[in-house]
Image: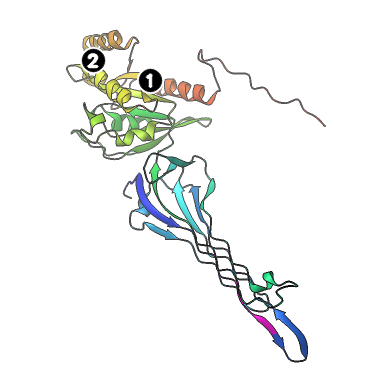
Amino acid sequence: MKFLDQAKIYIRSGNGGGGSVSFRREKFIPNGGPDGGDGGNGGNVWIEAVEGLNTLIDYRYKQHFKAGTGHHGQGRQMHGGKGEDVVLKVPVGTQVLGEDKETVVLDMTEVGQIECLLRGGNGGWGNVRFKGPQNQAPRFANPGQEGQEMWIWLRLKLIADIGLAGLPNAGKSTFLAAASAARPKIADYPFTTLAPNLGMVDLSPGERFVIADIPGLIEGASDGAGLGTRFLGHVERSASLIHLIDGTQDNVVEAYRIIRGELDAYGEGLGDKAEILALNKIDALTPEAREEKAAELEAVAGRRPMLVSGVSGEGVPELLRAAWAEVRKNRGEIDDEGDERVQLTEAWRP
């Protein structure tokens, strides 16, 4: 299925049904009178976050969604039915933005979350509502209220615990395949990954988290170079980032600085996220080369990088354990020193 993470759509709630002008006329019943019913309310437009979706491709080929009009009232005080609602089903993590593509209207972060985007118009009153001592035979009724309409943007931000960052060919997809059951496309050329991939890391029955692999960044990505920073939104919600550096390239320090510069330029707090630095592809390096490149990274980053290889699996379990610790910190299960937090619960009462 094709990946689509943003779409512009038009939504409109239903008009209310008109009230009825009717009078009761029956044989042998001399005292008739107005008996026109009310119109029904127009349909609403809802949005719901559901399981099983990870793309907005459903909104690629249909962009207009209109709720039903309320039914008109009828005689004998029969009220019209409500118009049919429209429910937009979206993946968890979808944001609803205004037409300016900046104003956040809603953020769908939980499965089953359902919100009303537009309310349908109210149904008009029938003439029976207007009868009184001074107007015993009203010959008018209210029309239904007009529905609302608007253009909105849907933007998907995948909900992952850990995000993978790095230059093209840093080995992110290979690492994701080694760490999880995901099977992303892997090849020996840059920009193999053209859309984000998600992988579930299963350390044990009670230790699971999700990793998001995004397309590689290049220098100038914040200005639109390469694929730009469009897909960085998918790691905004991550607890931390795993920054993979290709150990086989000549200048690992420059590779580190490029990615850090693009993360800071993007904003949205990505530059402030906890980062796990890892020197990848160490299976292709000699012990002396490993130590030399690790020392270069430590000098510029201020911390020792972890040594891993997505091909041989060396160092991968240790890196995943470090990532799991960051996830637990973000969830509030442990503190910054790695100690378990005491969960205070209310005392039992009969």
Magenta-drawn stretch contains 38: no
Q: Position of residue 285 (x, y in %)?
A: 22, 17
The correct choice, above or below, for 281 with respect to 48 in the image is: above
Residue 280 can be seen in this image: no
Q: Position of residue 281 (x, y in %)?
A: 25, 22
> What segment is highlighted magenta in the picture?
16-24
Q: CA distance from mark 2 to mark 1?
A: 16 Å
Amino acid of disc 1: Glu
Residue 314 location, quadrant: top left
The correct choice, above or below, for 126 with respect to 248 in the image is: below
The correct choice, above or below, for 93 with respect to 133 in the image is: above
Q: Position of residue 37 (x, y in %)?
A: 64, 73
| Circles 2 and 1: CB atoms closer than 8 Å | no
**Residue tagged 2:** 253
- Binning the other alpha carbons within 10 Å of mark 2 as few (below 14), some (14 to 19) or many (20 upward) gives some
Magenta-drawn stretch contains 20: yes
Circle on res. 11? none
**Residue tagged 1:** 275
Tell me what residue is drawn at x 72 percent, y 88 percent.
26
User: Taken as a whole, is the magenta stretch helix, strand or loop?
Assistant: loop
